[in-house]
Image (spheres, coloured by chain):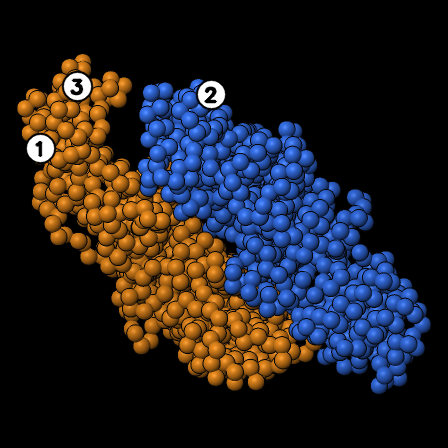
Chain colours: A blue, B orange
């Protein structure tokens, strides 16, 4: 919950403000003043009458009412001050930049909890502790530089880590990335990344709100909230990219040592981001490059025109884009193409890449861009590469590019690599509000990433033929641990998951009846012995009543055998479904092909329950073994829609059975429309 | 062939020199003068008496003898001038920066050929045409900026593309990359990237030569030469990284349209680079980052200590390194670790990452680095992350880091992200000869790339039990096209490739004898009918003489049947071997698992014939399905050494049979030591 007082305060007090701008309390006050906070500004410092030209109060008790307080004092002083401020001074925004809380010690954790209780009691918002502060259009309450000049249409940036926030801004600013706001949430004692996102979702105004959010997350405390508001914002037209640091085991160790972040399993994060439609990044350079892509107009398809005055970068960009699934279509023959050729020097190429040579000029660039924007229907966007070998100025070229950036209907991605030779011209281009991608391959990868991130998925639960009350009854009655076949069968039947028909028989007569019911061929197995195969207790491919009788009599006499299980003999390709309950995230669903595909090649995709049909289909389509499931070279596969439906049904069932901590169906056998669960394990823990 | 006159000329003439430094001929002369060429400098310009303070000759005829000539005049004038220079003026170095040759037209191609004939006749070296020139310690004969101040221990840089060379320098210089020489070979009419590398190999001096080479290649004209000299240089202690642009189909199209580059199949390039030990890069940023890694001391293992004052970047770096197969080991308990802790502020972590907090200072950094270098035997290198939130100067920290960069035994990789907040301090650090990696994830990926590139492979041919004369006889006698089984069997027997034993029989008696020879179980197939299965002409798993007789009589009576083939029935996992002859590269060898693994999952690795045992083993180990070949969960695999040996034998055979353009063995069946070729196709084209 973010209060109006925190975002748009009419008054701010800096507690622990100093004249020494090498100290956080000094630098923060300086930043507030220099970035033009227009409300009443107070400072508290018991050892000075005046700080940076502002009258100092000796303690928070002496302050008048004040809407937001920034605390830069030792941790142990904070709880008391916070109480005074919220209780007596009507403070409803609190930013604590001090460290020494839960990230350091148990004692610090207690201090942090006291503060959270106070702010919750008084309905105040708390940012931090252990953060660099926030920057909103109203105030720059951060103790670090650079303080970017805010741009309403820049990106909102929320970070779990203060230092990383600084380094991300330093990575983005040289590329022309603008910021609309910056939130460093530190220990997220009350307000985490998810909460800031929730606030942005709630106040979103299609007319005035920025469309781009960048996140640096060390720990996802509330996956549901993140999913809800990220996907809601994206549905409203926003674009979100995020780093979730700590994807490797050692990385999680590093994250834990940092801000006490709980390591959440990486496939859960992956599934959550895909469901929400968040573009996942793995580094600062990648995040700010994707951020710059978001600043350009949206590309409505996957076909790029590469416009260049130098061959090499165009080739490398082509490689990167094609590797990422984008296309560089040939420009079709047309009058427009012929007309364009007349504008260009001999030797220029009007295929794609469109190469207008080292001598290519501003007027020619304009003509090419116009043709791509208006005439060449086979392209959806343009990447323009134009550097300088240092012979002559390129200001006129960048001026044309600048104009086209603003007027074209299709997006233009500028690649201006000569950051040394024409640094002034590049700086001018950026100063006009544009972005620059100095390296074409990093751009190519960022564009691919954006193009390959799915749209947010629906969170509707598929309930057709899923008997929730029955599922709840079964789970409530079940014991803890791995479940016996009866429970598994009842659950599958209640969820509408097709399974191999099985019957348990104890007499030859029952066996004969069962065979008639199940049809041929069938399988017979002993019930009782643990290692069924070792005692020759499994018979496959039984195809007449004579053998049923013969084998029944043999099997029932195997020691420890209590009964005989008779089942349909399913056939087809081996499929695999799995699910694991992940704290806070819910069930992570996995699908793939069974056997070596899952065991050796780890070819599985993941999604977050509950799944919709589109989401399940996209999980199946993203498998490397998808071709096998689809069927190839005349080999029959399994009906994908059916497979997706089983995945969806399973996820719906689990949504109402959080006690199922782990389960898999391995294998399901699939042959055309007939997909049957053959073997399954389910572990319940209440 | 590079002449002494080209590299260390005592005199240079710039033909087409101009007072206008916005023209190539003007800028080139300016660069030569400003970068202190110490020999005699002449200019030719018919329309001026003096150019940039140097007396101008009206034509090349009037010149005195001159060792190297740079031509910046229209293409059509070049052949004649070149002849005059080489024939009459003893010129032995020619650099043609002009365009308008083979990259533009057939006419231009002819001009280029005339020039090549001239320089070859007179034993001169030709750089270009269509290039930016070269920079050696003696002269900066380029028309572009920036002209890096050369550093004998910097990197040698060779580029197929002039503009790309400029952009690569502009990418490297801000990171502190130094250059020892720059060669832009343009159209490579006489001297290509491979030839410059050959020259560097031949003049290599372990005492004085630089160890790092960076290449940008658009077309590999002479793969053998590249392989020979790249691997030779690497064996001498050099490190080489290269971009081969045009890896996608569309990328090759772009490369072709650029300098008439012939698209070579990408797997051939991949195989060549692996065999040579070249680190393959895909973009400018990646190439220069790997170049900067090369500038650091060599890391002797895969275990990195991450030393940081900020958590986020350390987590992201950990993720990137672990994803790339490097390790971030925990620091073991020891006295040294305890002693180090005493140096640090409370709350610091001496695990790994070693986090000495936002307040961490220069003295502490020194102590940590010393401990890692001297005491912590579990680490092989250090990545040091230190930026600035803008509160206080960090010059003292960078000074300590600078000293340690020079004195430590283990490599240090500096990550100084605050390129805005402390740009001056970073500039100072670079000016001391250091490199900087502003983004930790790009560093992590570059380090992984370097660590995962194999050492150069031996080029010895394995000949033990490979009967080359017999192979030649068989190939010489063979017709063009797909080969019949007899030829394939003879070839395999000559190369020592084990295969399933087969016998052709025409009578029941022969069948009985054959069965005794082959052993049980066996397979019987009709010879004659095309669709053997459709006519029920295949019998598997035959295991006694009675069935042999029964089935022989049935099979021989199937229409069109001429005889019956009897074969051992091999079993085990399906393996795949393939080879394809690629112009200029020779045979590309492929290996993998058969069936869906190769058909659907494309899980194959490639190598260049002839293969050594190590190389073949590494191909097998790099397969995703390696675990299956090795055997897993009690399932028997195939002997890897045997599989590797078959791959090696096949490659040795092909080395002497270039007429075999395509072949595959699919499947080989492998079970433990027994690996047998079951089915093979070989296409010969003479």
Closer to the camera in the image, B654 or B433:
B654
Left/right of residue B62 with respect to residue A591 in the rendered view: left
Query: Callout 2: 10 Å neighbours few (<14), some, many (20+)?
Result: some
Give the spatial CA distance, label 2 vs label 3: 40 Å
Q: Is residue A62 visible?
A: yes
The residue closer to the viewer here, B275 or B78, is B275
Q: Residue at x 36, y 24 (%)?
A: A548
Residue at mark 2: A517
- Give how far apart the Cα atoms at labels 2 and 1 are: 48 Å
Place of residue B250 in the rendered image (x, y in percent of width and height, measured from the top left):
45, 41
Residue at coordinates 60% horizontally, 33% vertically from top-left? Answer: A495
In the image, residue B205 above or below residue A205: below
**Secondary element at image label 3:** helix
Q: CA distance from mark 3 to mark 1?
A: 19 Å
Q: Which residue is painted at 40% across and 47% down in the image? A: A600
Residue B567 percent across, percent down from the top left: 16, 32
Judging by the rendered image, the residue that carries numbered circle 3 is: B555
The answer to whether residue B471 is left or right of residue B451 is: left
Label 3 CA crowd tier, 10 Å (few <14, some 14–19, many 20+): many
Q: Which residue is mark 1?
A: B516
Measured along the vertical axis of the image, is residue B127 above or below residue B53?
above
Of badges 2 and 1, nearer the viewer stands 2
């Amino acid at each position: 919950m973010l209060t109006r007082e925190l975002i748009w305060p009419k008054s701010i007090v800096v507690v622990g403000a100093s004249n020494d701008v090498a100290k956080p309390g000094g630098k923060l006050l300086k930043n507030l003043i220099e970035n033009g906070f227009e409300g009443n500004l107070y400072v508290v410092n018991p050892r000075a009458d005046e700080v940076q030209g502002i009258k100092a109060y000796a303690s928070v008790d002496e302050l008048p009412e004040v809407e937001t307080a920034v605390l830069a004092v030792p941790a142990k002083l904070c709880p008391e001050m916070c109480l005074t401020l919220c209780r007596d001074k009507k403070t409803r925004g609190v930013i604590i930049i001090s460290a020494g809380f839960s990230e350091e010690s148990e004692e610090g954790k207690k201090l942090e909890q006291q503060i959270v209780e106070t702010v919750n009691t008084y309905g105040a918002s708390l940012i931090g502790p252990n953060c660099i502060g926030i920057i909103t259009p109203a105030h720059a309450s951060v103790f670090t530089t650079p303080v970017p000049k805010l741009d309403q249409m820049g990106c909102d940036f929320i970070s779990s880590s203060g230092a990383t926030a600084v380094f991300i801004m330093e990575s983005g600013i040289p590329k022309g990335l603008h910021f609309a706001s910056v939130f460093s949430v530190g220990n997220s004692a009350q307000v985490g990344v998810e909460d800031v996102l929730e606030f942005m979702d709630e106040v979103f105004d299609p007319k005035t709100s920025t469309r781009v959010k960048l996140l640096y997350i060390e720990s996802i405390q509330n996956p549901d909230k993140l999913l809800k508001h990220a996907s809601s914002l994206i549905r409203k037209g926003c674009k979100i990219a995020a780093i979730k640091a700590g994807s490797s085991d050692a990385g999680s160790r590093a994250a834990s040592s940092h801000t006490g972040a709980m390591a959440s399993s990486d496939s859960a994060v992956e599934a959550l981001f895909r469901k929400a439609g968040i573009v996942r990044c793995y580094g600062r350079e990648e995040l700010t490059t994707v951020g710059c892509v978001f600043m350009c107009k949206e590309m409505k398809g996957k076909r790029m025109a590469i416009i260049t005055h130098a061959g090499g970068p165009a080739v490398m960009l082509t490689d990167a884009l094609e590797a990422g699934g984008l296309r560089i279509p040939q420009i079709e023959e047309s009058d427009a193409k012929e007309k364009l050729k007349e504008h260009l020097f001999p030797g220029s190429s009007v295929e794609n890449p469109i190469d207008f040579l080292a001598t290519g000029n501003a007027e020619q660039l304009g003509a090419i861009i116009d043709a791509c924007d208006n005439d060449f229907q086979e392209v959806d966007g343009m990447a323009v590469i134009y550097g300088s070998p240092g012979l002559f100025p390129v200001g006129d070229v960048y001026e044309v590019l600048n104009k086209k950036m603003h007027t074209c209907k299709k997006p233009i991605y500028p690649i201006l690599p000569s950051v040394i030779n024409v640094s002034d011209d590049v700086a001018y281009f950026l100063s006009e509000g544009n972005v620059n991608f100095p390296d074409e391959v990093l751009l190519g990868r960022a564009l691919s990433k954006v193009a390959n991130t799915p749209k947010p998925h629906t969170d509707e639960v598929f309930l057709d033929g899923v008997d929730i009350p029955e599922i709840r009854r079964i789970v409530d009655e079940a014991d803890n641990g791995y479940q016996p076949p009866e429970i598994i069968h009842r659950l599958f039947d209640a969820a509408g998951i097709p399974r191999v028909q099985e019957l348990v028989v104890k007499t030859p007569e029952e066996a004969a009846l069962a065979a008639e019911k199940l049809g041929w061929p069938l399988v017979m197995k002993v019930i009782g012995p643990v290692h069924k195969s070792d005692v020759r207790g499994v018979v496959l491919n039984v195809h007449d009543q004579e053998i049923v009788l013969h084998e029944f009599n043999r099997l029932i006499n195997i020691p420890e055998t209590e009964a005989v299980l008779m089942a349909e003999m399913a056939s087809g390709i081996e499929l695999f479904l799995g699910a694991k309950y992940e704290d806070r995230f819910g069930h992570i669903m996995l699908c793939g092909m069974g056997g070596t595909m899952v065991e050796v090649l780890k070819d599985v995709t993941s999604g977050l329950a509950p799944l919709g049909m589109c989401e399940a289909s996209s999980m199946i389509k993203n498998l490397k073994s998808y071709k096998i499931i689809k069927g190839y070279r005349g080999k029959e596969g399994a009906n994908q829609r059916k497979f997706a439906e089983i995945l969806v049904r399973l996820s719906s069932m689990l949504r109402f059975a959080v006690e199922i901590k782990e389960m898999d169906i391995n294998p399901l056998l699939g042959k055309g429309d007939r997909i049957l669960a053959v073997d399954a394990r389910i572990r319940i823990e209440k």
